[in-house]
Image: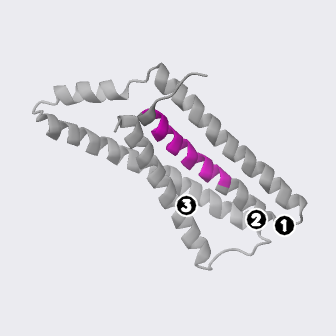
Amino acid sequence: MTYNSKKNIISMAAGVLTIAAYIITVRAGDVPAPEDIAAWAKLMLVFIGIGIGAQIVIQILFHVIYAVGIAVKENDKDGEKTKKIINASMKEDERDKLIQLKTLQIGYICAGFGLMAALFTLAGGAPVVIALHIVVGSSAVGSLAEGCAGVFFHERGVRNG
């Protein structure tokens, strides 16, 4: 499995954990009233911040564990061989840029459909908090879809066109 695939999987796992924590918090019952949009927005912003922090910490831990794993695998005492392998695996080429463009397109499509769904629910008379959840949920689904597509394209390859 490539470095980029592993990085995507770790990122997706952090995203899933953040989504699960939000759902558990909301299902626990200590949530604002559906009419209190400002409180819901603050709660969602808190979890977005938690998600960003979790991504940073998990990516740092991933890179440390990745470097240690390479050093152990290569039996590298001074770290020079490990440094070369890590630098080689982190270089971005045209294939990586093409994969990034394709995965971003998938994420934007998911977010766009979510926004349209939220507008339709508002037009249908649903509470605003439902539309807010649809927008945030579609962004989360888009992020997970980007990660899945990234793993797929890195492992199976991608064609231009």
* Picture coordinates of residue 13, whole percent (x, y): 45, 54
Check contact, mark 3 vs mark 1: CB within 8 A.
Answer: no
- Which image quarter: residue 121? bottom right
Check contact, mark 1 vs mark 2: CB within 8 A.
Answer: yes
Residue underneath mark 3: 19
Q: Report whether 39 appears left or right of 16.
A: right
Residue shown at the point (14%, 34%) measured from the top left? 74
Q: How many marks?
A: 3
Instruction: Say whether residue 145 is magenta.
Output: yes
52 lies above or below 133: above
User: Mark 3 vs mark 1: which is more N-terminal?
Assistant: 3
Q: State whether residue 56 appears in this view.
A: no
Residue shown at the point (52%, 65%) measured from the top left? 20
- Measure how far apart labels 3 and 1 are at the Cα level: 23 Å
Amino acid at circle 3 = Ile
- Measure how far apart labels 3 and 2 are at the Cα level: 16 Å
Span of residues in magenta: 138-154
Amino acid at circle 1 = Ala
Residue underneath mark 2: 130
Residue shown at the point (47%, 26%) measured from the top left? 96
User: Mark 3 vs mark 2: which is more N-terminal?
Assistant: 3
Q: Residue furthest bottom?
A: 29
Residue underneath mark 1: 126
Check contact, mark 3 vs mark 2: CB within 8 A.
Answer: no
Q: Main secondary structure of the magenta part?
A: helix
Q: Residue furthest top?
A: 94
